[in-house]
Amino acid sequence: MNPPAYPPRPLPGLGFQAIGAEEEALVLEVLRRKEPFRYYGSDPAKPPPMAAQLEQEFRQYIGTDYALAVTSGTAALEVALAACGIGPGDEVILTAWSWIACFTSIVRVGARPVLAEIDASLNLDPREIARLATPRTRAVLVIHYQGVPAAMEPIELEAHRRGLYVIEDCAQSLGARYRGRHIGTWSDIATYSFQYSKVATSGEGGMVVTRDRRLYERAVRMSDLGNYRPVHAAQVPPQEPAFVGGQFRMSELTAAVALAQLRKVDRIRDHCRALQARIVPRLQGLAGLQLRPVADPAGDIGFELYLFLDRPEWVAPFRAKLDARNVNCGQRTGTYPQYNRDYVKTGLAHAPAASPFRDFKEWPAPGYRAEDFPRTEDLTKRFIALPIGWRYTPADADHIADSVLAVHREGLG
């Protein structure tokens, strides 16, 4: 008997799948001007416009006062941390379930990452702030994981009553909202990424946003070797003393692609949300299977569904059966608990004295071991991730729902 014929596997991906004539036109505009550097070109009195235009449209899009384009989402995190004055001796709370850059950017500025548990939304459990805060804690780094906004109101209350900065990492979730407001506007300072796999991409690239004039000036100085050029001074007159910064300036070519992509974010979000809406109602209430809870379902971008099975040993066979039906699915989606990463297991930085863990008598120390995170371990071993991409069709969405229901009928045990 021939095996059943299933629809072809859809092409995954978000922003990069939407690249087209708009990106090409803006890149050609930069090349024809022969001005790929943002701060000066052929006319010293008239700096090239692309990065500045990206910043203007970005702050208008999310509804904030200041935006600074940088080279990557990782650079954006380092710039944001430095803008807040975070460094050696300080601690920053973040979830153990988060991308590499979230942890390493804290180490890079000399501070110590303090790992927190997630809740079933795969975002920070707000109660962890009270458990983990010490006199050395300076900030909470909130990661909006895979298009779903974290519960910002209780997080803000827990952090600000302790005098802590709140930094939002919106790298995976450009376009998401919480209670009607764009993520990135709830915190003291926030970051975004234009890396290849993100909602909008320029290959690499990042953005730092804030409403705080002082944080903006400090972010600019950190991104540009301590400089504060006229394009920024026109927005915020300089008041901060110069300090040694890094070099994280976005090029005009990167800005051109990012600008064209930014203009497509709402279409990508609306497309994914429409397809998700075809799937979710059909999967609710299935025995032994739950959908990822969302703090604000109206703000979810909708590009990835998460199915939690009651038992971790059910995950691999369930996923294999979905994969056999040409349903794109995975368990880790590129993210792993930080305590399982090699750089955490060694506790090293680029030089021994630069490691914030150098004074621990044993390593991995408590707070950096799998056994210290029972909820994170449980949740991340029980889910299956189902991506929804720009090239997916309503028929693809229906096939995803049909396949989950069919595999569920076959039994979970």
Image (cartoon, grey):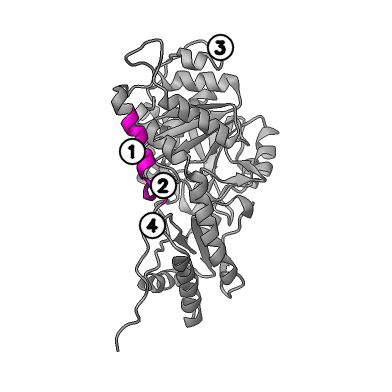
Label 1 – label 2 distance at C-alpha:
14 Å
Mark 4 or 1: in front is: 1
Q: Which residue is mark 4?
A: 12
Q: Position of residue 353 (x, y in %)?
A: 38, 26
Give above or below for 156 relative to 135: below
Give above or below for 249 relative to 105: above
Q: Residues within 10 Å of mark 2 (few under 14, many from 20)?
A: many
Mark 1 or 2: in front is: 1
Q: Earlier in the sequence, mark 3 or mark 1?
A: 1
Residue range corresponding to the magenta coloring: 14-29
Identify the element where label 1 is drawn: helix
Q: Which residue is mark 3?
A: 237
Mark 3 or 1: in front is: 1
Q: Residues within 10 Å of mark 3 (few under 14, many from 20)?
A: few
Which residue is found at the position 63% from the left and 36% from the top? 186
Residue 93 seen from this side:
yes
Label 3 – label 2 distance at C-alpha:
35 Å
In terms of secondary structure, what is the magenta stretch mainly? helix
Q: Give the quadrant of residue 28.
A: top left
Q: Position of residue 331 (x, y in %)?
A: 43, 60
Q: Position of residue 324 (x, y in %)?
A: 36, 73
Task: Examine the structure image and report whether residue 377 is included in the region drawn in magenta.
Answer: no
Q: Give the quadrant of residue 205.
A: top left
Q: Which residue is mark 2?
A: 15
Residue type, numbered disc 1: Glu
Label 2 – label 4 distance at C-alpha:
10 Å
Label 4 – label 1 distance at C-alpha:
22 Å
Q: Earlier in the sequence, mark 4 or mark 3?
A: 4
Residue type, numbered disc 2: Gly
Q: Which residue is mark 1?
A: 24
